Image: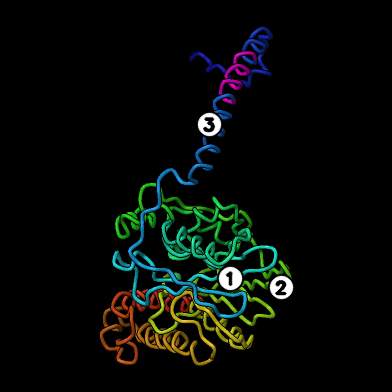
Amino acid sequence: MPARKPVLRPSWQTSNFKFVPVLVAAEWNAMMNLLRGRVLMLLLLALSSQVNGREAAYEPLTVNIEPIKLTERVYYVKGDLGPISTSNNGYNSNAGFVITDDGVVVFDVLGTPSLGAELLRQIRLITDKPIRRVIISHYHSDHFYGLEAFKDAGAEVWAHRLARDYLATEAPTLRLEERRNSLAPWVDEHARVIAPDVYLDGDTDFLLGGLRFRIFNVGPAHTPEDLMLMVEGEGVLFAGDLMFAGRVPFVGDADSKGWLRSIERLIQRDPKILVGGHGAASTDAATDLKMTRDYLRFLRQEMGKGVEEMLTFDETYQRVNWSAFSDWPAFKAANRKNAYNTFILMEKEALTAR
Ligand SMILES: [Zn+2]
């Protein structure tokens, strides 16, 4: 007869009473040692962040960031229209900030730690008011990699709760590795992915320094977690990547059907000034959203036809006349991938429609 395997029990269930106190004492000592180590480490960290929030200096930029004044209290900075490159230092997206009597609210922080630090420096040239909060339109690297300097300045980071789902995948790590190659030295080994401090569940209003801010949950559109920020009274709407002005949008894994719906709602809000995630601010939302809207509709229509006729993606892509868009910036870098992702999306939509 084979020997019975011993049954493993937690220590408090064993009959060996003497064993338990010994273990507890040993654990207590180990825990205290660990705590002492932790306290020392935290002290060192606090000291180092007082000297220089980051372990290393931010890599100096070769491009300039110049705030553009939209209203008395609202500014934005406008990145290059092309795709990210070492020549534009990764500065291809927009960010905005609002100066209230009680502090500054920032919307997006650009695509590298250096760009974020420079954006903060530019804000500091205009105001010494505290940076209260940073709202991230969506967790794409070109909009949140600049967070480090803002976190070190004490800002609270807000984003939609679905950003948490994205951050739980391995995609952010893979993206960071890719950017350390494609955007070296501005994204280096010190760059890190910073998660939000506050996750928003839906539309959120807040008052600060006499201004009312309205955050709209507009996803799934460009991403599942898209947010827009309306600065009431100033008439400025920050739309994130719902609007790409003057260039071919980056579609990625977008829900283009939801995106088109959100564009319609955005036009109905009738902002005096609309600032997208890429390209110039607009004083005519309906006209300037046309490019993004027409492009998304065209993609869906042409890829949808290919899916319906059971063509392959290559066959579908080949036969499309792209001339309405091929002269736009970022067409070469983005169009084929956009079309491919839309083809897959149209296949999925066709399946679920059945
Ligand atoms: Zn973007």
| Element marked by disc 3 | helix
Residue 126, percent from left and from top: 55, 67
Ligand 1 sits in quadrant? bottom left
Residue flagged by tag 3: what amino acid is it?
Answer: Met
Taking the spot 43% from the left edge, 43% from the top edge, the residue there is 55
Foreground of the two, 9 or 184: 184
Q: Secondary structure at mark 1?
A: strand
Q: Please give the range of residues in magenta.
A: 25-35
Q: Nearer the viewer, mark 1 or mark 3?
A: 3
Q: Is residue 36 visible?
A: yes
- Secondary structure under the numbered disc 2 in the rendered image: strand
Q: Counting residues from the N terminus, which is met first, the one under dot 1 or under dot 3?
A: 3
Residue identifier under label 3: 41
Whether residue 140 appears in magenta in the rendering, the answer is no
Q: Look at mark 2 in the image and give the residue it sits on.
A: 212
Direction from residue 324 to residue 146 in the image, left or right = right
Cα separation, mark 3 vs mark 2, equals: 41 Å
**In the image, what residue occupies the spot 61% across and 73% down?**
229
Q: Is residue 327 left or right of residue 103?
A: left
